[in-house]
Image (cartoon, rainbow, N blue to C red):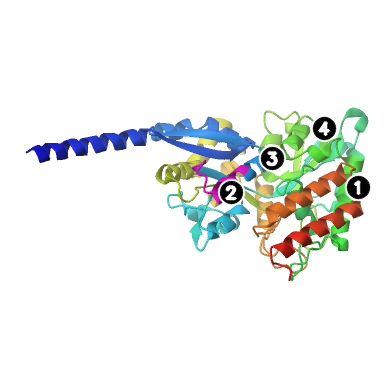
């Protein structure tokens, strides 16, 4: 009899302990400080009401800092985070290393846009779920374009951008023809410059992994960028990334901004002083068959070895679901839902009324990560090279090019230094024999 009572008591004690443990589940979520991610944090009551046993703790970081902390944590198995916000660059590399948990509860994965889903799949398994997908495009002031006597084509050339920037610049009144990323970082200025370089016929490496910064295509790219920014860009541009340029554009200081398509909802939103004067166009080209736009998805993933995988699967599924899209639409309007992830969104007649919806989808569809350049290359990736060494190398090159924009290095010195740094690191890594 005693053993039976003990058994019952033990079972009850175990159940109580399990319930307590469940009630104490706190997910630590590392995320980027972009507007869509900040908005999600304000809407999580919907999740916690359905999952009262799960609490959410947010670590919200600037893009470069997020990448550094998340990469360090997962590589060292630090276990600091239960859900990671990572991009299209990290997913295939980390997935192959076994650092991510395959996602098994995602809402209707077949509804994901093929270009976005493909970049997040490793060996047939979805390793991250896209919170929003993006390319890049031109956002411009329609009133300033009219004042300049110009009409923005749906598919402009870089020559047109330079002409328009020159005509729109009015430094006496604090208006700059163009705002572009200058802040150093492989996902900051080098995302923009790498995508731009594709349209100039440049590439990071030839088929034998030899760096190409000593070739004329890269010189043409960097010269165009520096000349354009020095003539028509804002002061202090070498410190400006996505958020800084967004603030400049929204305050009426930029004639054009070429950046992530996800910014469209912000430049037309309530915090923009020019919301009713914004037009959209594809990223520019030079007639060589490649546009200067990228392909990216900020996605949610679960690090392997997480002790809270079940709760993490539930949260990732909720945050990237069609249901979440409907929550945002109800609270903020269709223009503010996370874009670029699902076919059903672009088939929705309500979303089709959003002025930037079609241009965003066209931009995403025009990017080809498997053939990103004019000349053949041994890598995939549009604004990045999908090898583990790229982040470190491109961060160094980004610092060099940012210094050139600040006037601390000449064009030729910057390119020579980029060539030397990249050659040294690729040799050390064994790509160059």
Which label number is shown at residue 346? Answer: 2
N-terminal label among 2 and 4: 4
Q: Position of residue 119 (x, y in %)?
A: 59, 57
N-terminal label among 4 and 3: 4
Tell me the quarter of the image containing the C terminus. Answer: bottom right
**Magenta residue span:** 69-82
Q: Which residue is mark 4?
A: 253
Tell me the quarter of the image containing the N terminus. Answer: top left
- Can the viewer see residue 134 in this picture? yes
On screen, residue 12 versus residue 36, left or right, reads left
**Residue positioned 52% across, 39% down in the render:** 29
Assess disc 2: are there few (<14), some (14-19) or many (≥20) residues with their C-alpha within 10 Å of its C-alpha: some
Q: Position of residue 68 (x, y in %)?
A: 64, 44
N-terminal label among 4 and 1: 1
Which label number is shown at residue 264? Answer: 3
Query: What is the CA distance from the residue labelled 2 to the residue labelled 3?
Result: 15 Å
């Amino acid at each position: 009899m005693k053993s039976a009572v003990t058994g019952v008591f033990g079972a009850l004690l175990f159940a109580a302990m399990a319930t307590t443990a469940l009630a104490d589940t706190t997910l630590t979520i590392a995320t980027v400080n972009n507007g869509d991610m900040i908005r999600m944090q304000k809407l999580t009551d919907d999740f916690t009401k359905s999952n009262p046993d799960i609490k959410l703790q947010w670590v919200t970081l600037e893009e470069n800092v997020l990448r550094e902390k998340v990469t360090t944590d997962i590589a060292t198995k630090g276990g600091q985070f239960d859900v990671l916000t990572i991009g299209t660059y990290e997913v295939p590399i980390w997935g192959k290393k076994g650092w991510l948990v395959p996602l098994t509860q995602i809402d209707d994965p077949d509804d994901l846009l093929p270009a976005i889903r493909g970049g997040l799949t490793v060996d047939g398994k979805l390793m991250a779920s896209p919170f929003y997908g993006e390319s890049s495009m031109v956002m411009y002031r329609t009133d300033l374009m009219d004042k300049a006597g110009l009409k923005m084509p749906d598919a402009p050339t870089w020559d047109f951008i330079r002409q328009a920037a020159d005509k729109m610049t009015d430094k006496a009144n604090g208006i700059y023809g163009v705002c572009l990323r200058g802040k150093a970082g492989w996902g900051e200025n080098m995302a923009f410059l790498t995508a731009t370089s594709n349209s100039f016929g440049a590439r990071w490496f030839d088929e034998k992994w030899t760096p190409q910064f000593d070739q004329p295509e890269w010189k043409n790219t960097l010269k165009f960028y520096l000349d354009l920014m020095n003539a028509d860009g804002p002061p202090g541009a070498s410190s400006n990334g996505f958020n800084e340029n967004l603030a400049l554009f929204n305050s009426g200081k930029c004639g054009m901004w070429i950046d992530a398509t996800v910014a469209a909802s912000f430049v037309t939103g309530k915090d923009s002083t020019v919301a009713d004067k914004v037009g959209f166009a594809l990223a520019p080209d030079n007639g060589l068959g490649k546009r200067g736009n990228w392909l990216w998805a900020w996605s949610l993933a679960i690090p392997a070895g997480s002790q809270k995988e079940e709760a993490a699967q539930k949260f990732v599924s909720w945050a990237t679901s069609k249901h979440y899209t409907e929550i945002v639409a109800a609270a903020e309007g269709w223009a503010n839902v996370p874009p670029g992830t699902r076919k059903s969104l672009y088939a929705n007649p309500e979303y089709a009324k959003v002025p930037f919806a079609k241009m965003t989808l066209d931009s995403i569809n025009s990017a080809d990560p498997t053939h990103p350049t004019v000349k053949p290359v041994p890598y995939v990736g549009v604004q990045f090279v999908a090898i583990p060494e790229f982040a470190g190398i491109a961060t160094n090159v980004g610092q060099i090019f940012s210094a050139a924009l600040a006037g601390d290095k000449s064009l030729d010195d910057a390119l020579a230094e980029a060539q030397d740094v990249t050659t040294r690191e690729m040799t050390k890594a064994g790509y160059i024999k």
